[in-house]
Amino acid sequence: MSVTGDVLLAVDGLSKHFGGVKAVDDVSLEIAPGRICSLIGPNGSGKSTLINVLSGLYGATRGSISLLGQDITRRRPDERVRLGLARTFQNIRLFKGLSVLENVMTGQHCRTSSGLFRALLHPASRREEAATRKRALRELEFVGLPDVAAAPAGSLAYGRQRLVEIARALASDPTLLLLDEPAAGLNPHETEALDRTLRQIVGRGITVLLVEHDMNLVMGVSDHITVLNFGRKISAGTPEQVQADPGVIEAYLGTGDARGADAQR
Amino acid sequence: MSVSSRLLERPHTLAALLVLLASLPFLVNPFYLGVVVLGVIYALAVLGLYFVMGLAGQLSLAQGAFFGVGAYTAAILSTRFDWPFPATMGATVAAGVLVGVALGYTTLRLTGHYLALATIGFAVIANIVFLHWKPVTNGADGIAGVKPPVVGGFILDQNFFYYYVALAFLAVGALVGWRLKRSRIGLAFLAIREDQLAASTTGINVLNVKVLAFTLSTVYGAVAGGLYAHGLTHYISPDNFAFELSVTMLVMLLLGGQATVPGAIVGAMLVTALPEVLRFLDRYYLAVYGVAVVLLVVFLPQGLWGWLESAVARRPRRLEGR
């Protein structure tokens, strides 16, 4: 690995076993700040499991995760968000009954502090709420959805729901953003917009870890790619290096996955 | 559809409801004044359920037991230790916090129906304790002679005056509930109701926030119980806090509308008055009541207030159509 300078996220010997199934098996990787790193691999290679372990939804069976030098292996998901690690879901998980704006506002929860008594007695809580609202509107504008703030989140089209989820994650001021297949179900036009949004996110100084099947997007946008197969890391490097790696080509062709052809090209 | 923009949830709607409640003793037959007092007291307990179930989406089935804990706390302190009304009411708050935090942190760690099961268990155990811990609770005989509040030498033991004592508590409780829904904490409650897992990966400490919602419910329940002990007949016994009361309070919330303050109040008042209104049904009352509840849940899943709300929201469109 050619990581120089400081490391934002360091994953060391990470494993997640479900009974006898080694969904993630002894994976190590490092992510340098300010880049777009991608995680690819055939279906069932452990990408989503790895994201779930990184974000704290699954406990690690073995190994460690550290964010900015701090060990977060045993931290709760919400603690990881507070430390700067935000995520989105492959199958979108918005608060469907709440408005789009309210969804994004929840992202600010860990950056604000009004508790029960302050909300009841102190005017500062109102100012904080106004600031949260403003911030949420800004994030909606950032992802290109300034006009749907009042709509129920569940009423939006699929592609727009994905953007709301990204806005919600951004509202938590992340240093590292984990995006689990953000292009799934998007049309080519929306994918192009996503490509631009990703670059703008990095432009804000936020590092992105992208799990994605859309190889055009991955190869175009990534600075660094890690390839998983059967839970193990089989390759890592720049898009060019990964595409030329015979092991990667074999992994994709071996599965007979139609998308594998993209990786080969 | 933004929570704060709903027509019937504006502050003046709540204010209008409170004014209506304040004039209620002048509007009803004095014979039914006791029922109205009871309705206001129950409404405060049901407002507690509004936090934990309406906002945070956690099914709690022991509101009647928390009501009982508050009632016994107030009754024992008032009759044995001569504590005045403000002190016993303070003690009910403490009792509510104690029960909420202890039960919350042990049962809310797990997702799923554990809270529902644990609260059923608590409701049953609490009633057994009320019934059999005779040295403290006086068993089946109950506790009589709970002292009414005294303001400036004036004893508020008549329903007419006690109504306003209870209403003051309800008004404060309603304002807290109304304000909290629009706060950072209220939004976290709603997020947990919608999707706990997503709430945690959005940065919300799900356990703490759930315990907070639950503790609000136990405190409201216990305070309402204290009001119950000090008013009406000044007498409590284990029958007053049987498991059915917890179920009835749940029905009150569902009928009124889970996630709104006015809904919780209206639901509690209506269900409290129902036995009086349907008295002519005599022994068929329970059957009719049961059918009515089923019909309401099926046809008005958002409760009366939710139904009223959508009716109001539809009206402008209808006018445009003309």
Image: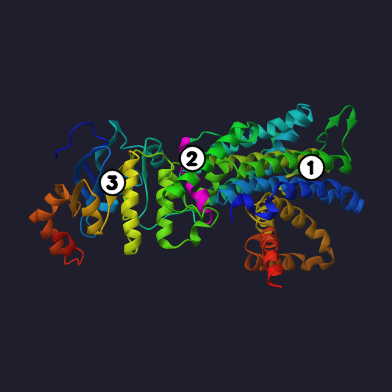
Whether discs 1 and 3 lie on one chain: the answer is no
Give the magenta-colored segment's residue range: A97-111
View extreme (left): residue: A246
Q: Quadrant of the N terminus of chain B?
A: bottom right
Q: Position of residue B261 (x, y in %)?
A: 68, 49
* Disc sitting over residue A209 in the figure: 3
* Residue at position x 52%, y 40% in the image: A132
* Disc sitting over residue A109 in the figure: 2
* Residue B33 seen: yes
Label 1: state its secondary structure: helix
Is B280 in front, or is B41? Answer: B41
Check disc 1: other Cα within 10 Å, few if <14, some if 14-19, many if 20+: many
* Disc sitting over residue A117 in the figure: none
Measure the alpha-carbon separation of dots 1 and 2.
34 Å
Q: Position of residue A94 (x, y in %)?
A: 45, 54
- Give the amino acid type for the residue marked by disc 2 in the picture: His
Is A122 in front, or is B191? Answer: A122
Check disc 2: other Cα within 10 Å, few if <14, some if 14-19, many if 20+: many
Measure the alpha-carbon separation of dots 2 and 3.
23 Å
Q: Nearer the viewer, mark 1 or mark 2?
A: 2
Indicate yes or no whether the magenta region holds residue A175.
Answer: no
* Residue at position x 76%, y 53% in the image: B269
Q: Position of residue A151 (x, y in %)?
A: 54, 57
- Give the amino acid type for the residue marked by disc 1 in the picture: Leu
